[in-house]
Amino acid sequence: MNIILKDTAVAMLLGISGGAFAQEPSSVLKQFDKEGDGAISVAEADVASRAQFEKLDSNHDGLVTEQEFVAARLALLHGLDTDNDGRVTRSELRSRFLTSLRQ
């Protein structure tokens, strides 16, 4: 199966569910709220979605394939799996969450 994602809005959602999912909602808002007005505008969302898409599009061809998507998700898993046993425990996820709050 070869899935290709072209919509930057979908890429933004994937990015948020990936790298930012372990963050407190207010820190995610601050990350994307470049104008500092406490809200994410369409322009800010567009910038964020393009940045997330570019992270997923590892060969920079303007498309995200299933292989690129799976590789990004595996990288996320490996980043959370601190004891390298191939599984993410509640403790590992909690540790990541607490670390992100301190940043």
Image (cartoon, rainbow, N blue to C red):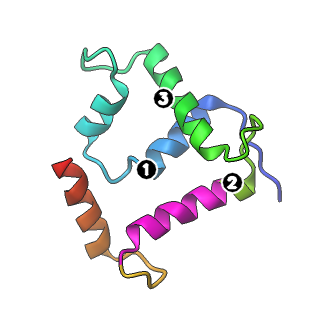
Element under label 2?
helix
- Residue 30 in the image: above or below residue 21: above
- In the rendered image, residue 77 lying in the magenta stretch gets the answer yes
Which residue ends up furthest to the right in the rendered image? 1
Q: Which residue is mark 1?
A: 19
Q: Which residue is mark 3?
A: 48
- Which mark sits nearer the N-terminus, 3 or 2? 3
Q: Residue at x 74, y 34 (%)?
A: 62
Q: Which residue is mark 2?
A: 68
Q: Position of residue 14 (x, y in %)?
A: 54, 45
Magenta range: 69-82
- Which mark sits nearer the N-terminus, 2 or 1? 1
Quadrant in which the N terminus appears: bottom right
Q: Position of residue 15 (x, y in %)?
A: 50, 43
Q: Position of residue 58 (x, y in %)?
A: 67, 47
Q: Residues within 10 Å of mark 3 (few under 14, many from 20)?
A: many
Horizontal arrangement in the rendering, residue 70 relative to residue 12 (left or right): right
The front one of 48 and 2 is 48
